[in-house]
Amino acid sequence: MTRERVVVGLSGGVDSAVAAWLLKEAGYDVIGLFMKNWEDDDTDEYCTSRADLVDAVSVADVIGIEVDAVNFAAEYRERVFSRFLAEYRAGRTPNPDVLCNSEIKFEAFLDHAIALGAGHIATGHYAGVRQAADGTFELLRAADRTKDQSYFLHRLDQRQLGRTLFPLAGWQKRDVRALAERIGLPNHAKKDSTGICFIGERPFRDFLNRYLPREPGDMVTPEGRIVGRHMGLMYYTIGQRQGLGIGGEGLPWYVADKDLPANRLVVVQGHDHPRLAAPALEALDLSWIAGAAPDPSRDYGAKTRYRQGDATCRFALDPSGGHLTVAFDEPQWAITPGQSVVLYRGDVCLGGGVIERALPQDTLSAAA
């Protein structure tokens, strides 16, 4: 009997390595694929792509699978990085991991894998997928809630989910590392990657300054009092406390808003300042996993950032279906334009959109 071919995205990390091993043990014809997606300043000082490729090849040798390398740098620059820069230029704080997944890891990669004869692709993401009774595919939270990555995967569509396997859906991270050590994977103790998707860990301000001009300006209170200078609005995000450099006594300072026309950063004192909380938001660039929006008459849970518990909410769509208004039972802290709001029904991730702005109290009726 011919075994189904599965192409696994091997990043050089422990999660994708264990995912590949599990699939090989399950009897699949497994091929590893290492994606190189960034070429600018690809030096040993910052970028670990060469070291990651070495780790991926070493892992493949232990597992007993072939590994190939493919360069998606052009696709990454066009589909992800150009939008990343445009969002910063517009004063927002984008989430490149979300675009990375939908445009590269589950689009360019999927197309390449199908060309190799694969029935499915697989990754080391902590998430799950299942087929519902009506035949649609659902994106699920992972068993390890501390590592669940469904938030970053909420833009996947039915084609992508129907072709994807998540072998780590039911695993705890500690057990993944323990298994990796037991079977002799050389990267079993390798630390998890951080930084910008596929670009890696770099001094953020220096990196961004290479592509966008630095435009310093005033830091002001909501009343207009100047309390400091900022290095450029693109370097700051709503709710940021560190790196403001505002002296004086009293409660710590936080970024509350960006005044783009005047190039001013609005700051407030105290974590609980009312300017930092909002009861509702508007989102654009919507994406629904099922292909259509869920029933707006029900209550849902939502995240406005990755490291956040679900907030009970309800939502409304404008007649065109392109503008999403989400109203929360409790005001949410530091709602950030450019980040994603993601809706859940229990353990099922439904999709979401890109936050355009926080909304004040009098807009709650729009989502009732």
Image (tube, grey):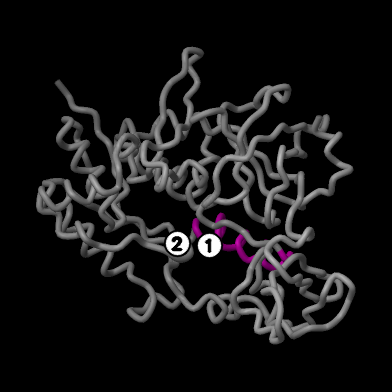
| Name of the residue lying farthest toward the front | 250
Residue position for label 1: 77
Q: Is residue 86 visible?
A: no
Is the C-beta separation of discs 1 and 2 under 8 Å? yes
Magenta stretch, residue numbers: 75-91
Look at the numbered disc 2 and give the secondary structure of its residue: helix
Q: Eyeballing the image, is 151 above or below 192?
A: above
Question: Residue 143's quadrant in the figure?
Answer: top left
Front-most of residues 288 and 146: 146
* Viewer-closest of 262 and 144: 144
Q: Is residue 18 magenta?
A: no
Residue 145 percent location from the top left of the image: 42, 42
Query: Could you say which is closer to the camera, residue 70 or residue 236?
Result: 236
Residue 165: percent from the left, percent from the top? Answer: 34, 34
- Image location of residue 229, percent across then percent down: 74, 85
Q: Nearer the viewer, residue 82 or 46?
A: 46
Q: Residue visible at 52% across and 52% down?
A: 307
Please name the residue that numbered disc 2 is placed on. Answer: 73
Q: Going 77% across and 65% down the picture, which residue do you hit?
A: 257
Give the side of residue 270 with respect to residue 106, left or right: right
**Dot 1, how many residues are within 10 Å of its Cα: few (below 14), some (14-19), or many (20+)?**
some
Instruction: State the predominant SS element of the stretch in magenta.
Output: helix
Label 2 Cα neighbours within 10 Å, binned few <14 / some 14-19 / many ≥20: some
Instruction: Check disc 1 and give the amino acid type.
Output: Arg
* Residue 161 higher or lower than 20, as above or below: above
Instruction: Estimate the x, y position of residue 186 in percent, counting from the top left.
Output: 15, 59
